[in-house]
Image: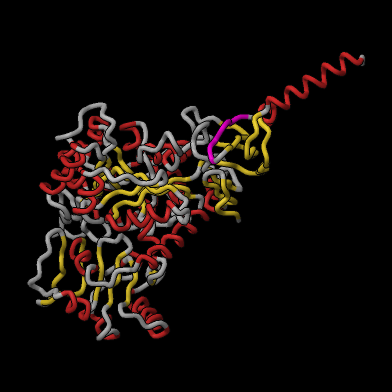
């Protein structure tokens, strides 16, 4: 090679090196599921200053970028950071410090365990959550008798798994001043033999909760940090907290500003005075990690405690139709406030009559092809005539797939033939072509892969039933992945920032040990999160 030729190649090499952009990271994987609009699959991407810079093939990216560090996950699979479109982030943290009641097989066993727990750690109140009478052999709702026997002087407050019902003892009832004559709008106090039997449904349960000492700010901070840590372990990088008071939103904002809470939160507002005044009317602003533009309401209760509002009586309890938790006038008033101030609305509606009522109210404000993204949370039972109205009004059905496989053992007893229009995720998805998925944790598992499994396979953790529960309403793996990433971000007005691995978006991603898009169904739930990243920083590593 002549001197001139060597000089030419040297100069060319120097020019090429000089033209490379210096970046923080280049990340390699066996597959990178970008979950962009075209569902592109790559094997590498570039990150700089917490943002995705480029996505493609490893060799090509190395030609144009000079990374300070290379993360090699060549044997594993990368997905956008998972997003839970409906959960209770604060509630999960609080529950982690209370007694979990979901593992007992009878009411008697549960109360016996409470005695031992209290004896080892006495507290001013005995507080627990998670019991489900449908999992007990006799399947009967509990009452206060055993609680009164073993806790005659200590108030006891035990919340059902769905969060819409509680059983308390006489001591708690006395503290709250609840008698057989007490009435609470939007709630029910169950009375037997002329006195409350300890069961409180919906707003009656919430009324009792006001008498329990509230956690301090330091308590809440500790609980939130625990919740965030558990989210990272399962690959969650963003959550929607479905209903918060003003004080909790301000606390969350302060913790994000100092970097203690690093995950993104879409915080729905409880329709309380402070939220309406400070946030809706006065447009208080928050840090970029906190989205606040949705008002959250409850139309009815839950199916498991027969509080979901139905057109026809419960098949297993003909005297019950469910509970209208919030009046039509109140829902309409909040919807008008939201509409006039460019806020979204999300209404919890589980029964078919509740869904119909909410759609009727929404129709006063929503026009075809709107992009207001008003939501119905759960939409578990939908009357046949109402499915198309989701499309006509562009209402988002916000689903929680694990509810289907948790409820399937008893849901048909509640609904009879109406079960054919229940948990209809495919039919709901077809209305607008997309929907967001969440878990409703702590009611269900915090692990988004369990929701993915339920949505696609329609079975519980034990692989039951053999053919899947109402399998005609399963959605595809691709649709389920969109529902827990890009579509979940879109439901929270955040699709320009997160939900997919694309240039200019925040660098949130999760590394899995297997390909959930192709692995056998019976191995899906064995998938492990190996690492979770937020803004290009590792927040969890197995």
Q: Residue 256 versus residue 459: which sits nearer the camera?
A: 256
- Residue sitting at 68 percent across and 25 percent down? 19
Which residue is situated farthest in the left direction here?
Answer: 181
Of the 4 image quadrants, the one containing the N terminus is top right
Asked if residue 32 can be seen in this view, the reply is yes
Where does residue 381 sit, x and y in percent of width and height?
26, 46
Where does residue 36 sit, x and y in percent of width and height?
49, 31
Up-down: is 172 above or below 222?
below
Where does residue 205 sit, x and y in percent of width and height?
22, 66
- Using the rendered view, name the quadrant where residue 71 is placed: top right
- Using the rendered view, name the quadrant where residue 160 is placed: bottom left
Prevailing SS of the magenta stretch: strand
- Residue sitting at 36 percent across and 79 percent down? 114
**Residue numbers of the magenta segment:** 50-56
- Residue sitting at 37 percent across and 77 percent down? 109
Say whether residue 177 is left or right of residue 449: left
Q: Residue 441 versus residue 263: which sits nearer the camera?
A: 263
Say whether residue 170 is left or right of residue 158: left
């Amino acid at each position: 090679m002549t001197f001139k030729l060597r000089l030419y190649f040297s100069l060319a090499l120097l020019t090429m090196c000089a033209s490379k952009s210096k970046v923080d990271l280049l990340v390699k994987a066996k597959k990178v599921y970008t979950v962009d609009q075209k569902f592109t699959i790559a094997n590498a991407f570039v990150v700089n200053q917490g943002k995705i810079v480029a996505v493609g093939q490893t060799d090509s990216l190395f030609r144009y970028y000079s990374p300070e560090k290379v993360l090699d996950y060549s044997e594993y699979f990368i997905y956008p950071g998972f997003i839970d479109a409906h959960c209770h982030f604060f509630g999960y943290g609080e529950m982690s410090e209370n007694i979990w009641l979901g593992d007992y097989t009878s009411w008697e066993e549960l109360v016996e365990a409470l005695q031992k727990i209290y004896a080892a750690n006495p507290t001013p109140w005995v507080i627990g959550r998670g019991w489900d009478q449908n999992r007990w052999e006799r399947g009967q709702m509990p009452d206060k008798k055993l609680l009164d026997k073993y806790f005659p002087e200590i108030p006891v407050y035990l919340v059902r798994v769905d969060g819409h019902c509680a059983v308390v003892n006489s001591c708690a009832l006395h503290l709250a001043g609840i008698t057989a004559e007490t009435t609470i709008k939007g709630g029910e106090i169950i009375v037997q033999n002329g006195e409350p039997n300890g069961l409180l449904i919906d707003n009656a349960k919430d009324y009792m909760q006001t008498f329990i000492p509230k956690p301090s700010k330091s308590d809440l901070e500790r609980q939130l940090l625990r919740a965030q840590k558990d989210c990272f372990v399962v690959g969650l990088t963003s959550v929607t907290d479905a209903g918060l008071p003003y004080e909790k939103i301000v606390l969350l904002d302060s913790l994000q500003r100092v970097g203690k809470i690093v995950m993104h939160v879409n915080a729905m507002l409880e329709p309380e005075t402070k939220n309406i005044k400070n946030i809706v009317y006065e447009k208080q602003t928050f840090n970029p990690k906190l989205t606040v533009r949705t008002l959250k309401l409850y139309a009815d209760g839950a199916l498991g405690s027969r509080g979901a509002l139905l057109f026809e009586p419960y098949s297993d309890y003909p005297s019950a139709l469910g509970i209208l938790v919030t009046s039509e006038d109140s829902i309409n008033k909040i919807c008008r406030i939201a509409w006039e101030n460019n806020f979204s609305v999300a209404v919890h509606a589980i029964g078919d009559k509740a869904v119909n009522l909410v759609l009727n109210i929404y129709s006063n404000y929503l026009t075809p092809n709107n992009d207001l993204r008003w939501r119905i949370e759960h939409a578990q039972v939908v009357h046949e005539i109402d499915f198309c109205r989701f499309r006509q009004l562009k209402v988002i059905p916000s689903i929680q797939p694990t509810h289907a496989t948790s409820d399937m053992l008893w849901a048909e007893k509640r609904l009879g033939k109406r079960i054919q229009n229940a948990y209809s995720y495919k039919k709901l998805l077809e209305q607008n072509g997309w929907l967001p998925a969440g878990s409703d944790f702590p009611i269900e598992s915090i692990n988004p892969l369990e929701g993915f499994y339920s949505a696609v396979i329609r079975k519980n953790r034990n692989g039951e039933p053999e053919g899947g529960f109402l399998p005609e309403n399963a959605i595809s793996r691709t649709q389920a992945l969109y529902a827990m990433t890009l579509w979940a971000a879109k439901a929270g007005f955040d699709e320009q920032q997160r939900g997919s691995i694309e240039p200019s978006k925040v660098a949130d991603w999760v590394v899995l040990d297997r390909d959930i898009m192709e692995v056998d169904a019976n191995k899906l739930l064995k998938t492990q999160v190996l690492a979770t990243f937020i803004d290009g920083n590792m927040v969890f590593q197995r």
